[in-house]
Amino acid sequence: MITDAERRVLEEIIKNPIAGQGEIASSLGISRSAVASHISSLMKKGVLKRGYIVNEEPSVVVVGGANFDIKGVSFSEVIPMTSNPGKITFSPGGVGRNIAENLARLGIKTRLITLVGDDMYGDMLLKEAEKAGIDISGCDSISHRSSGTYMAIDGPDGNMVLALSDMEIFKEMTPEFVRTRQKALESASVIVADTNIPIDTIVYLKSQAAALYTPFCIEPVSVPKAALLKGHLDGVYMITPNKEEAEVLAMMDIKSDKDVEKAAVSIASQGVSVVVITLGQKGVYLYYDGMGGFINSIATNVVDTTGAGDALFAGIVYGIYNGYDIKKSVRYGLACAAVTVSSSLTVSPMLSPVYIEKIMAAGN
């Protein structure tokens, strides 16, 4: 990640590629030696080549779903087969989009690759994504499909009772579609996919990540979609199944802590470097390099659990992007999840590196 001072020097170079160090120093009001130091650092980070040729700033590329979310929260215990009084809200969502917004709020340059319908929901999704700081140059709209839509019903405790999704549009996100975004993949420090996209596309992204020596991380999304990953996990760097998704991937029932450990080992044996099994308020089980252990969640006042998994995933990717060790990355993700569940919004506006560091410090 480049510093603010390095970014200002980089902006001067982009504006005038033939400017000398003295000219840049004069423009920014800093010393020539400081400019030389920043340029040296930018070269070491791979942002600049010799001759001040600018490489594209490393980014995280997220390939996945962007949906229009409809969320209902019942005022009391949900009673089936009848109308339940409650509150209904509308917001942008989708696993891929949520992960991208979390990353953007954490200060990471994030590109989203997705499809929306040529409709009012699609327009709203793209405008809100751009407003959140997400690069949407890899997004497109199509007229023959409606935008992805997700509807969830939560109980008064904030836990989901039922959800329905219309994700037909993401069948159009074929390998051919993603291939036209190759430049974005080549500039990525981490490539992320959710399983709303076709399995052929996930396999293609995995092969590209391998060719580019770039970590490839998958969010399984749901039990039926996680099942599609079986036989395709070899070469995945990190995956974050919940208990039910882990049962499908490991092909076993999980009824105890020992079962959680066995499931993680089974998933890792299929070629995954880092397995993070999410366990709700209990935290996660992390397995990597032949070692495993439980990591507790950070205690907080739970308002709504929607989006917690997306925030956890984004926080772990933030750590990977910044070169943290995997345990610190997971703890960072747990802090992001804690901030998210304490908000009624799917992506908390409180999310920032400074605030997350405070949460982590308090949690320790």
Image (cartoon, helix red, strand yellow):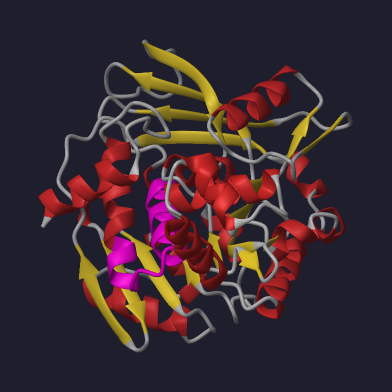
| 317 on left or right of 112 | left
Based on the displayed image, in which of its 4 quarters is residue 305 positioned?
top left
Return the x and y of residue 229 as percentages of the image width and height: 61, 68
Return the x and y of residue 249 as percentages of the image width and height: 51, 71
| 254 on left or right of 224 | left
Is residue 324 a member of the stretch shown in magenta?
yes
Return the x and y of residue 339 as percentages of the image width and height: 28, 39
Q: Quarter of the image containing the C terminus?
A: bottom left
Work out whether residue 4 or residue 332 is closer to the camera in this orientation and state it.
4
Above or below 192: residue 133: above
Q: Inspect this view and state whether residue 98 appears.
A: no
| 148 on left or right of 351 | right
Report how many numbered discs are placed on residues in the image.
Answer: 0
Above or below 259: residue 54: above
Tell me which segment is drawn in magenta: 309-330
Q: Residue drawn 78% across and 50% down?
A: 173
